[in-house]
């Protein structure tokens, strides 16, 4: 068999440096094309395919690639003894505790310590082994780094900017765009202009009124001149070699959205802490972002390496690189989203469903100060703002699965929030020919529990062993027959008991149960059962008729084969019901 040596050999592989372009194009095509993902959780880190060994036989130079540059002017810091140097924890000096405590609320983290440590401190290179040796293309696109801020702490903002300047290859940074979202602090005005004037690449964009994070980012994007947009929060520290691996992914495919591993800058002692490997960005209902570790047995079975790229159902939101034109093709963020929150869900669904990918790149690492509370004010109520944003996302992207969203946050339907006009967003989705949310669940996030109904099948009265059946449009009791269509019901996330497209409705004064049109706005059709009856722990096996002036429960009267609602009684067996199958845990 033919052995192809790893080092470049004219004899075995006659491609010359002059043919570089061809090689890198082939490389690119390989990466873009057929290379299958190893598991659902990871993506190919390196281009693979039938020509791979031939290409790997070339020297990096002839492949148009180089090793990730080790650009870090903080490697031998000016003052190695300074507090916080190398990312080590810092203790508030004796006698300064009160001051430190007082200043905490300026940023909801230890602002006193942040001011104490150098703005260009060194941090530990936390990349997994192998990252430093990885190759990236010589002709990576340039990026505009966009940092939006409102009333950010001075030293933290500076440290964020210095970390970009000190640890990025200069030729890849087209500019650093600081978008001031109408900060009120004086030091963020003249002082900041003056300080940043020493860095020609730093531009400050001042918004005349508070846009909120989401629209501030859009303002940044509209003013950006680089090929790629790299968004960062304003309290971060980029680690060694953070940028090239992100741009490499976007270079390989313009529809890849690349996120660094987000490490932790401790809010109390300002230490730089690494995080566990193999974490995916996910969400739980009702669309709460979170991290989920790939199970160790999956890692072992699929031989997933620490450096392997991880495909993410959703991104955290703050730190990512995206091709600028692609961002605009996708219609940016929904501009109807307000201030803060939910935009990471929106962009994630949009990217995946409309043909792109979201990846975490383990060789790119950026620290972020996680805070317990936002240190700035919200123009409107914070909770309401986020909920309204999420409702917009659900209405545009979740299809029939939006019921799960509403079902996990009951108050969301009840509130009847005015979420504004959605026509443009829905039309955009059509225009981009995006796939369904069902496709997304099956292909991107198969481990999310998303049963469309909570329970279903026949509905049995526990005491009598009889089932509800439909006669004309009235519900009666009958012998159970699992094969009869007349006895099939679904208990939905909107708390309907559905028979086909119709809903079980009670008319308490008449003492009968009938089928009616389902209408989310009308309360007379909703029932609490199992976990939905959380407020009535003694009545979980009951079916509580919701929103009547008294607590009424579904009750069987077997002698008359009828059903009605009566005052709930935890002890009454005739009020205990079971569906054939339950889908929630
Ligand atoms: O009105 C505002 N205007 C702004 O310019 C509100 C905020 N901002 C700025 C702010 O100064 C900061 O630099 O926007 C940035 C993000 O705001 P944070 O730091 O208060 O947000 P966060 O880190 O608590 O929250 C996460 O979710 C946000 C809203 O959905 C954004 O997407 C953040 O970027 C995001 N942060 C991250 O992804 C970092 C990791 C967190 C996790 C998990
Ligand atoms: Mn943040």
Image (spheres, rainbow, N blue to C red):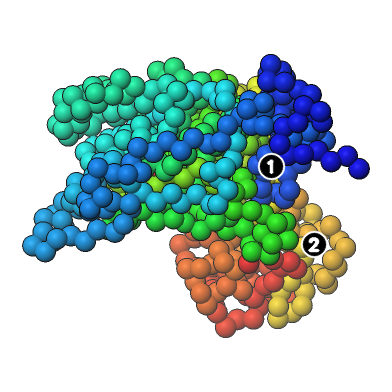
- Relative image position of residue 135 (x, y in whole percent): 60, 36
**Location of residue 566 with respect to 243 vertically, above or below:** below
Q: Secondary structure at mark 1?
A: loop
Residue at the farthest right position = 1
Whole-number angstrom distance, CA of label 1 to CA of label 2: 50 Å
Image quarter for residue 136? top right
- Relative image position of residue 151 (x, y in whole percent): 23, 37
User: In this image, 522 relative to 420: left or right?
Assistant: right
- Relative image position of residue 459 (x, y in whole percent): 73, 67
The C terminus lies in quadrant:
bottom right
User: In this image, 466 relative to 536: left or right?
Assistant: right
**Location of residue 146 with respect to 532 vertically, above or below:** above
Q: Residues within 10 Å of mark 1 (few under 14, many from 20)?
A: some
Image quarter for residue 201? top left
Q: Which mark is residue 44?
A: 1
**Location of residue 334 with respect to 45 vertically, above or below:** above
- Relative image position of residue 394 (x, y in whole percent): 56, 41
Residue plotted at (26% across, 50% down): 80
Taking depth in this image into account, of 380 and 287 the one nearest to the observer is: 287
Residue at the farthest left position = 95
Q: Which mark is residue 260?
A: none
Q: Secondary structure at mark 2?
A: helix
Residue plotted at (72% across, 21% down): 16
Taking depth in this image into account, of 536 and 13 the one nearest to the observer is: 13
Q: Are marks 1 and 2 in contact (CB under 8 Å)?
A: no
Q: Which mark is residue 487?
A: 2
């Amino acid at each position: 068999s033919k052995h192809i040596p790893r080092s470049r050999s004219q004899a075995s592989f006659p491609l010359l440096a002059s043919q570089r372009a061809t090689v890198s194009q082939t490389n690119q095509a390989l990466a873009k094309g057929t290379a299958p993902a190893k598991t659902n959780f990871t993506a190919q880190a390196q281009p693979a395919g039938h020509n791979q060994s031939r290409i790997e036989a070339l020297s990096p130079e002839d492949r148009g690639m180089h090793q990730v540059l080790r650009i870090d002017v903080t490697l031998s810091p000016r003052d190695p003894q300074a507090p916080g140097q190398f990312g080590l924890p810092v203790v508030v000096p004796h006698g300064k505790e009160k001051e430190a405590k007082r200043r905490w609320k300026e940023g909801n983290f230890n602002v006193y310590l942040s001011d104490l440590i150098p703005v260009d401190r060194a941090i530990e290179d936390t990349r997994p082994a192998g990252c430093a040796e990885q190759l990236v293309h010589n002709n990576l696109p340039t990026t505009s780094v966009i940092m939006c801020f409102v009333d950010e702490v001075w030293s933290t903002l500076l440290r964020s900017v210095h970390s970009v300047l000190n640890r990025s290859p200069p030729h890849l940074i087209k500019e650093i765009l600081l978008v001031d979202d109408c900060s009120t602090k004086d030091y963020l005005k003249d002082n900041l202009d003056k300080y940043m004037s020493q860095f020609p690449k730093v531009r400050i964009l001042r918004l005349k009124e508070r846009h909120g994070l989401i629209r501030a980012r859009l303002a940044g994007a509209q003013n950006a001149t680089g090929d790629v947009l790299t968004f960062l929060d304003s309290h971060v520290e980029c680690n060694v070699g953070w940028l090239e691996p992100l741009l490499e992914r976007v270079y390989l495919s313009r529809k890849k959205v690349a996120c660094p591993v987000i490490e932790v800058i401790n809010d109390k002692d300002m230490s730089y802490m690494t995080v566990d490997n193999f974490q995916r960005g996910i969400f739980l209902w009702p669309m709460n972002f979170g991290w989920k570790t790939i199970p160790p047995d999956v890692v072992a079975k699929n031989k997933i390496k620490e450096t392997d790229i991880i495909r993410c159902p959703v991104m955290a939101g703050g730190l990512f690189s995206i091709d600028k034109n692609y961002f605009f093709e996708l219609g940016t963020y929904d501009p109807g989203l307000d201030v803060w929150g939910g935009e990471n869900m929106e962009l994630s669904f949009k990217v995946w469903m409309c043909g792109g990918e979201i990846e975490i790149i383990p060789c790119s690492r950026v620290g972020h100060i996680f805070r317990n509370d936002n240190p700035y004010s919200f123009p409107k109520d914070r909770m309401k703002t986020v909920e309204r944003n999420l409702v917009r996302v659900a209405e545009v992207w979740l299809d029939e699965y939006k019921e799960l969203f509403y079902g996990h946050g009951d108050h969301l339907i009840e509130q009847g929030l005015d979420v504004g006009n959605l026509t443009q967003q829905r039309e955009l989705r059509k225009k981009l020919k995006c796939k369904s949310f069902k496709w997304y669940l099956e292909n991107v996030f198969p481990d999310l529990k998303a049963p469309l109904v909570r329970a279903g099948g026949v509905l049995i009265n526990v005491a009598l062993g009889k089932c509800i059946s439909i006669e004309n449009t009235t519900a009666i009791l009958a012998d159970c027959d699992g094969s009869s269509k007349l006895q099939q019901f679904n208990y939905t996330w909107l708390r309907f008991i559905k028979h086909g497209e119709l809903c079980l409705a009670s008319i308490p004064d008449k003492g009968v149960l009938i089928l009616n049109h389902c209408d989310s706005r009308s309360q007379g059709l909703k029932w609490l059962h199992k976990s939905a009856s959380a407020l009535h722990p003694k009545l979980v096996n009951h079916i509580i008729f919701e929103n009547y002036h008294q607590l009424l429960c579904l009750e069987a009267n077997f002698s008359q084969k009828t059903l009605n609602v009566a005052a709930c009684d935890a002890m009454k067996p005739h009020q205990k019901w079971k569906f054939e199958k339950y889908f929630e845990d």
